């Protein structure tokens, strides 16, 4: 994203909390990120790191008693985190599309895919039946569904897993949204279908200048699809930067561990690298840097002060005291 471009979505110091009887859990803390037109931001991290929660917060879909307790979410020049459910309902689908992991949960098995597409198009764009059906056929063609004039009248169970996910992408694109949040869109698919879906997402993103937030734990998907990468750990953003830098020259010890744990083709090793320990529970995050119990480089300052994102050049930043030249 060039400096002259306004981000499609900008998240500033976002915090989410879930009040409980004995304590309040904070699954997101001070998360800031932005995505420009035609850009794919990959968001990676272990399960429970806050990836999906960030997407749900942007969509306004955090279930009670959870709530956004701090920060702001801007869609273009409008702040949307403070909107009521009715106002957010008009934005979801129309300006922000969503693609989720399992297409079977996104499609109603009782209706044809054409009925679901045309309903979405008519609701958001106000088209008539004939015009909406034409657009639905065009969308199915765009996402690579063969014989779209025939398949539009088929039910979800008549499609393979990969084809169902293409239909879900068509649904997400139905109203030409500015932003798509894709949460693990390829996890349930085999490798060859994954590659097709990622290629499709990337092509549509560039052609339509749609911003994409791609949530995944698969670094292979990130390498193929993303322009920039945001790495999350224990509800916080710990590193962000261009995909090449994150993959080949990460600056945070956690990201370095993630990259080192990926086996290399052709290399014979007796044991795969791993990051010892596990991510802390959200109600037991340690003081200082949340990664310090698992970090081989942790110093006294890491145990008492939480590092903020520090610029490490070329549009990259890392939340590590090592990048400030000290750990003491």
Image (cartoon, rainbow, N blue to C red):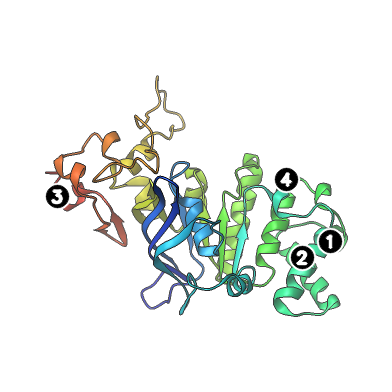
Cβ–Cβ below 8 Å for labels 4 and 2? no
- Measure the C-alpha gap from mark 4 to mark 1: 16 Å
What residue is shown at x 66% (from left), y 47% (from top)? 102
Secondary structure at badge 1 equals: loop
* Label 3 element class: loop
Which callout, 1 or 2, points at the residue further toward the start of the chain? 2
Q: Nearer the viewer, mark 1 or mark 2?
A: 2
| Label annotation for residue 117 | 2
Q: Describe the element under mark 2 as helix, strand or loop.
A: helix
Q: Marks 3/1: CA distance?
A: 59 Å
Residue assigned mark 1: 152
Crowding at mark 1 (Cα within 10 Å: few <14, some 14-19, many 20+): many
| Label pair 1/2, CB-CB below 8 angstroms | yes
> Can you tell which mark lies on residue 161?
4
- The answer to whether marks 4 and 1 mark residues whose Cβ atoms lie closer than 8 Å is no
Image x and y of residue 14, in percent: 39, 62
- Residue 170 visible in the current orientation: yes
Q: CA distance from mark 2 to mark 3?
A: 54 Å
Q: Earlier in the sequence, mark 4 or mark 3?
A: 4
Q: CA distance from mark 4 to mark 3?
A: 49 Å
């Amino acid at each position: 994203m060039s400096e002259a471009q306004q981000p499609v979505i900008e998240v500033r110091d976002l915090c989410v909390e879930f009040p409980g009887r004995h304590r309040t859990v904070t699954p997101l803390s001070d998360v800031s990120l932005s995505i420009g037109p035609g850009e794919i931001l990959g968001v990676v991290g272990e399960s429970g790191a806050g990836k999906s929660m960030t997407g749900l917060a942007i969509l306004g879909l955090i279930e009670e008693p959870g709530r956004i307790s701090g920060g702001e979410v801007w869609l273009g020049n409008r702040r949307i985190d403070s909107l009521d459910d009715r106002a957010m309902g008009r934005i979801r689908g129309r300006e922000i599309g969503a693609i989720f992991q399992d297409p079977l949960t996104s499609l109603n098995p009782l209706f044809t895919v054409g009925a679901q597409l045309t309903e979405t198009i008519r609701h958001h764009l106000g088209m008539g039946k004939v015009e909406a059906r034409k657009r639905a056929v065009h969308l199915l063609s765009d996402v690579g569904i063969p014989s779209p004039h025939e398949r539009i009248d088929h039910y979800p169970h008549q499609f393979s897993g990969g084809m169902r996910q293409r239909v879900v992408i068509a649904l997400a694109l139905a109203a030409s949204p500015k932003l798509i949040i894709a949460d693990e869109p390829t996890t349930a698919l085999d490798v060859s279908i994954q590659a097709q879906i990622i290629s499709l997402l990337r092509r549509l993103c560039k052609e339509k200048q749609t911003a994409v937030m791609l949530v995944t734990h698969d670094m292979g998907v990130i390498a193929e699809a993303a322009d920039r990468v945001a790495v999350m750990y224990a509800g916080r953003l710990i590193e962000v930067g261009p995909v090449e830098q994150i993959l080949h020259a990460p600056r945070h010890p956690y990201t370095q561990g993630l990259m080192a744990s990926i086996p290399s083709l052709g290399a014979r090793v007796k044991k795969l690298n791993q990051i010892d320990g596990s991510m802390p529970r959200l109600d037991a995050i340690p003081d200082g840097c949340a990664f310090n119990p698992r970090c081989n480089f942790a110093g006294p300052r890491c145990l008492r002060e939480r590092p903020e994102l520090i610029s490490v050049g070329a549009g990259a930043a890392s939340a590590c005291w090592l990048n400030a030249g000290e750990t003491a």
